[in-house]
Image: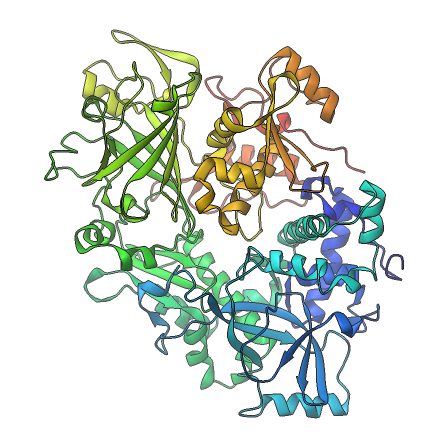
Amino acid sequence: MGRPSGDELLCPEIFGPFEAVPTQLRTAIADRLEQVTAARHGLLHACGAFNALYFDYSPRLRRYTVEPDPVAFITAPIGGPLPVLPVGAHVRLTRGTRELWGEVAAVIGAREDIDRDGWTAGALSGAPTADGLDPQRVIVDTEVFGPLNTAELVERGRWLRPGGGWQDGHLTGPVPSAVRGVSARDQTGLFAAHLAGLGRPLLDLGPLPGWLLEENGEITEPAIVRAVRAAVSCLGQIMASASGLRTWGLYGRSSTESSAFGDSGPGQEVLSAVGRPAPGGRARYTALWPLLSTLTRDTERPDRLSGVAAAALVVDANLAVADAVTNRATPPAIDVRIDDRWQQGGIWRAQPLPVPGLLAGLDPLSPAGVGYTESQAPPAELSEMTAGGVPIASRTADSDGSADNPGHVGVVHMDDELLVLTVALSKSALDTGRLELGRPVLALLPQGELILHLHHDGVVLPNQLAQQQVRRAGATVGRVTWPQGLPPGTRLTIAAARAGRRLTATTVRLSPPMEIQGFGTVRWEYDPPVLLRDTGFTAPPPASIYGASQFPLPRTSWRPAVAALEHLIVEALKRDGDAGPADSRRLDGVRLTAALFGAEARSPALLWTVIHTCEDMSVLGLLTQRPSLRNGPDLFTWWPPTPGALRARTASDGGLPEDPPGQPLSRRWIRPLRRRLPEGQQPSPESRRDYARWRIEVEGGGADTELPPGMTFVHGHLKGSGPGKPWHRHVARREER
């Protein structure tokens, strides 16, 4: 069959990057999804948005206009373990000969051992699944196929009775923690796998199979999975841009309904509970679902935690806390941050300031999962991780005499799978063959020996230097052989999978090199205070400091892009990539993840972090992206900065028309970023003006041009060139249609 009748918004563009969708079409889709959200109890997941377009959901009729095939539905019987029920899946709730149809509206983690006020031990926050099962709460909307008739209302009432199968109108039970390599927490991946497998008859109701057949002459399961994943990610970003919606992850919520929660009584009680540290100044972890359950049971609206309204309430609560954190409306001298987005609707962490070095500078709305990490650390390491103000690198010597003159360690990204940090090498570390990481960082990694995979930007290292087996020694790893000629203060960017034993590290070459009077030429990025301290020469100018934290592209997918990985990805492609035209190098996301972190640490979560980062790098022109000829994962290609490579790249992808000849866009850019100001300071009028101009030029006239409170704007530019040509004008963009 062809396109669902009456739907004029489903188009091939949504199965590609968000940037490829014309502005006018984005606006029309956003308007439709706002209407759908209002008609569906004020809540819509991006997977549900895919269904709404693909099966032509009518907000006026409050049902799909394309008749589904119930054979492709997932059966959810009463009692026993649950089947895998991703968000967006169509289900049959069966009880003997009776059944209800519905669509999964939300799924959240449901591990127990949590107090009624939401307090939970830190070990639950960010914890991996146990015994291959992941307890979940599955919220089903039984009205997406139209208003229920009398018999269906009676049947739903039976399900809602005590012992009837639903707990507060939800299915609760354990499901497998991974299915065919897809994490149970990756709802987009599970939804795509369902539509490529059991749910394939549903796809035949729409145009996607025909579009894929026209593209490459065959329809494979990987091709369907890639297309559905891309569409859900694109629709999630369209929802995030809609003026009438607010988003938390991939969940969209009606702005008008959500905004009132923060000022309500329950909203204020949530903020009070989440912003309260544990006795003695320790970190406190608060899970939202049990807290909301306690707050709503005794109100006039206990039904707010039943059915789809419960998921909407969880999103409202998370948005209210996120607003308070962003606007600095949390209690003074208290650091509040999300630590786990999945478990029990979200687990928030509160601790008195200052935060430990492990969290300093990290985005408070990026879940780091440090609760579980703290619970696994030995007592000596735990004290360093939780005590406010203790630096990562010890100030005094350990028992082995290390860290007497430490470098500087800064964590730039941390989540439950990945750690990215920068380390400035001290003179003592270079002389004694050590890498100073600090006990809190080492506590995040498996015990035992580690592998240091070292890259030296612009220099080909022999195998014995490029890959070294290193041993823990207190707050450091030892037995490191450093390349000759590294000056003190040289900065490494290091990435590690938290489940793996490989430290992938690289220097970053300065362009042009920095001349320091009395010292000489510095060719790689460095930390001026460490260089000054360990050499005694005049302090280098601040222009030599390039922060690793950058302003990312909009990303609402399950795993975010991580800008700090960019240089490591390029180095891995140059070293391990398959040779292509003009000395280019290419790998798919699976092989690239293994090259970075080792095959043993290649989890689905880590894989999608790498893929999304490569996708963003492709949009920026740092890589090119092409589908595999054999319907495998997409290929990402690095091109050297040579005239021959520029010609070959131009022939393959249309080129980058605004790049100067022979100089394609490179890693040497400072991206635009919003930077937090010291307490009491305000951004200058010039910063406000530049920010507004940048948002309008990038996002169009409907963009939000107001700087968030307490933030200033740093203009994107080529490193070392000053303001110059704005960064976003060098980004390859498709013509709007």
Residue 709, horizontal then vertical, whole percent: 45, 47
Place residue 727 in its image quadrant. Answer: top right
Residue 149, horizontal then vertical, whole percent: 77, 88
Residue 199, horizontal then vertical, whole percent: 73, 64
Image quarter where the N terminus lies is bottom right
Q: Nearer the viewer, residue 389 or 93?
A: 93
Place residue 523 in its image quadrant. Answer: top left
Report whether 58 appears left or right of 733: right
Query: What is the basis of the colouring in this image?
Result: rainbow
Residue 285, horizontal then vertical, whole percent: 34, 64
Q: Residue at x 42, y 67 (%)?
A: 131
Q: Would residue 1 be visible to someone looking at this image?
A: yes
**Vertical placement of residue 337 versus 258, above or below:** above
Q: Residue at x 70, y 15 (%)?
A: 647
Report whether 29 appears left or right of 525: right
**Vertical placement of residue 506 versus 175, above or below:** above
